[in-house]
Image: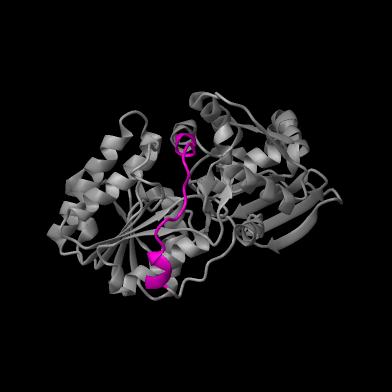
Amino acid sequence: MLILITGATGYIASRLIPRLVDRGHRVRALARNPRQLDGRAWAASTELIAGDVMTPSTLRPALEGVHTAYYLIHNMSSGRGYTERELDGARNFAQAAADAGVKHIIYLGGLADPEQHIAPHMRSRIETGVVLREGRVPVTEFRAGVIAGSGSISFEMIRFMTELFPVIPGPTWLKNKSQPIAVQNVIDYLLAALDNWDGHGQVFEIGGPEVAPYGELMLRYARLRGLKRSLLLLPGIPVWFMSLGIGLMTPVPRSIAYALVGGLGADSRVKRHDALRVFPEVKLIDFDSAAKEALTHLHPDQIERVWEPEERVRLLKHEGFFILHQRFVERDGFPLFPTRKNWHIEVNEPSRILLHRSRPFGEDWLERRVGRDKISTYFFAPLGLAGFLYWYLTYPFRALAFRKT
């Protein structure tokens, strides 16, 4: 089958596409700027195509010949009015899919009780599913809450906040219940829906095997990392203030943090367990096992390289790392790597060198790639507050040394 993945620059798409390719499917990835996908490991085995659900004319070539389309789009980062744009985009896509003869749409939305008072972000996720189902193409909708996996926005919020604060401040609704689901299980469900016609036209709430307060998830992550942490619950913390702090301290942009934090104000747990009956092949993974698996990805070779190869300089927080990436043009020369004895050589190839060292407050990697471009990338994975202090206090000197090493 030819399968279209929308939202191809997003987290779930980056985990789903390799699994589809491994199964032998032809995959077409839709993004507003496909060049952003050039650095992904799966890009060479995927058809990349430009398109935007807000511009219906771009959807016709994207949907031509497609059997199943995954709708993995959200607009939280686009700021005020994003809820209306989400519904308009879903409406455009449903119509274009019907016109193109698509047989099936699979949608991943948010887990919340629509009968309760929920945040606009969660309400928008649910209403997007409603709009898609109003179209003529059968839709299978999954609703998930906290997704536990390296790179997941909700997991990275847990990771960075827990690593940083010995006493984790938060609102009283950190006591609210969630039912986290491992990213592996989310992908399992999305794949199972491809061949299981019993799911057509249905909405499935999906979650892991346990229910726990949000705050407890942070403490459990801390135990896995060997960190002593406690919670300080403070009533009346404004959402804007929390989102500002999260935007500064974690990889989550402030606009997205604002929407997500608002969504934590209500329980997010499975009430209908139809997914377990319809998709019995999915074996649920508990939060601790999912978090342990995420920590095994704390290595440069295990993360999704979301930066564009063409970028000259990029500084970002991503999948547990602080990353400093730099591409050199010919006139820049090319810095050499440190030769100090405390670096361990992990990879030494003609086109790539990777050095590593461990410290009590984190781990460093230095990588050099030589090909069409000359690229140096520095990765630092902090461990606890000391790691964050080390990064922020020494960053100006490191940035200068990075250019000259």
Along the line of sight, which residue is nearer the eye, 255 or 343?
A: 255
- Horizontal side of residue 67 vs 269, given as left or right: left
Quadrant location of the N terminus in the rendered image: bottom left
Q: Is residue 265 magenta?
A: yes
State the residue at coordinates (67%, 41%). 162
- Horizontal side of residue 65 vs 361, given as left or right: left
State the residue at coordinates (46%, 40%). 266
* Residue 151 x, y percent position in the rendering: 54, 50
* Residue 235 x, y percent position in the rendering: 58, 26
Along the line of sight, which residue is nearer the eye, 53 or 83?
A: 83
Seen as rendered, the residue at the extreme right is: 341
Q: Is residue 190 above or below residue 271?
A: below
Along the line of sight, which residue is nearer the eye, 206 or 173?
A: 173
Res 400 → quadrant: top right
Looking at the rendering, the stretch of residues picked out in magenta corresponds to 261-279
Res 22 → quadrant: bottom left
Residue 286, visible in the rendered structure: yes
Residue 321, visible in the rendered structure: no
Give the number of callouts. 0
Q: Is residue 154 above or below residue 30?
A: above
* Residue 236 x, y percent position in the rendering: 55, 23
* Residue 252 x, y percent position in the rendering: 52, 38
State the residue at coordinates (56%, 65%). 285
Quadrant location of the C terminus in the rendered image: top right
State the residue at coordinates (19%, 61%). 137
- Tell me how the rendering is colored: one colour
Q: Is residue 216 magenta?
A: no
Res 248 → quadrant: top right
